[in-house]
Each structure stands twice: as C-alpha cells, then as structure tokens.
Image (cartoon, rainbow, N blue to C red):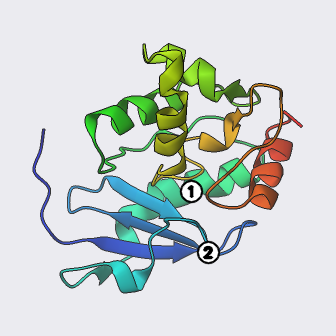
Amino acid sequence: MNTPSATTYYTTLASPLGELLLTGDAAGALTSLSVPGQKGGRTVEQLRDGPVRDPAPFTAVADQLDAYFAGELKEFDVELRPRGTEFRRRVWDALDEVPYGATTSYGAVAARIGASGVAVRAVGGAIGANPLLIVRPCHRVIGAGGALTGYAGGLERKVRLLTLEGSL
C-alpha cells in the first residue's frame, strides 16, 4: 500500500445536495466526500496539518459527480483511499457491489462480507461511518422491510439520490 503524504488537499463543489467537501491525498486519491450537516462528516476546520485548497486533484471526480447528478453516469471510476478499520473497509468495499438503481439491506451487506446475523448492527455502524458519500453508495442500503432508514447525509438526501437512480 502506498503511504500518502500527510498533506490533505481539499475543494468544495456545488451540487443538488448542497456544497460538497472533497478531501484527497497527495497521490490524488479521494479520502472523503461530505455534505453539509452530515453526521460524522468532515469540515474544513477539522482538516489538520495545513490543508491545501486546490481543485486540480479533484477534476475527474468533479466531472463524474456532474455527470452523475445529470443522470448520465451510473458508476464512479476514481481512486478511493478512505481511512478505517479492516472491518469497515470490507463493508465499504461491499457497497461498491450494489448497482445503480438497486437497493440492498444491511443484512445482505453483512452476508456479502461473511459476517454473522448478529453483526448486522456493526455493519450498520460501518455504513454510517462511510466517509465517501455518493461515490461509495451507502444511500442504496435500506431496512430489511424496505424502509428508508438512517443516512449520515440526511434522509431527504437519501430520497433524492434513490429517486435520481430510479429505485424510488
């Protein structure tokens, strides 16, 4: 695994969900994507070690986000480097397997990573801690009965994303 520089790069982008905060490392990998008021989301004030505001490293993801919100892109192709435990990374990787326009349950994600039924709550916690909203589609995870359950970016944003993707 590459060891990225300690410098954090960031930019903000206007979107239908509000201003997005994107952070990345010196190698150009996306480390977080947050929306305003997101539970557990990053803010510029939280960035340490002299963050550098620079939109250049985010050109590809910005173009892809624009295409996604225009209904022209169904899958993101950007390097992701979120920080988290091995368990969380396994859960987050499983989110990438949920296709555009589809939804899944917390239990199905647990089964996908080989976790027991009692681990569903831990899977839910990992999904809630996803630092890469939108590009890592935690909004596609719903309750077992089809209920729209928690979303760190707010349920109204979850509804907007699922409606955009045609699954509502």
Of 29 and 122, the residue lying toward us:
122
Q: Position of residue 144 (x, y in %)?
A: 75, 25
Q: Amino acid at mark 2?
A: Pro
At horizontal 69% and vertical 31% (from top left) the residue drawn is 100
Q: Which residue is mark 1?
A: 63
Q: Is residue 71 left or right of residue 26?
A: right
- The mark found on residue 36 in the picture is 2
Q: Is residue 163 left or right of residue 39?
A: right
At horizontal 21% and vertical 85% (from top left) the residue drawn is 50
In primary-sequence order, the first of circles 1 and 2 is: 2
Give the SS element for disc 2: loop
Q: Position of residue 163 (x, y in %)?
A: 86, 44
Toward the right, the furthest residue is 168
Q: Position of residue 9 (x, y in %)?
A: 30, 72
**In the image, is residue 44 above or below residue 76?**
below
Which quarter of the rendered picture does the C terminus lie within? Answer: top right
At horizontal 47% and vertical 51% (from top left) the residue drawn is 129
Q: Is residue 50 left or right of residue 101?
A: left
Q: Nearer the viewer, mark 1 or mark 2?
A: 2
Of 5 and 131, the residue lying toward us:
131
- The mark found on residue 30 in the picture is none
Toward the front, the furthest residue is 118
* CA–CA distance in space, label 1 to label 2: 20 Å
Of 120 and 26, the residue lying toward us:
120
Q: Residues within 10 Å of mark 1 (few under 14, many from 20)?
A: few
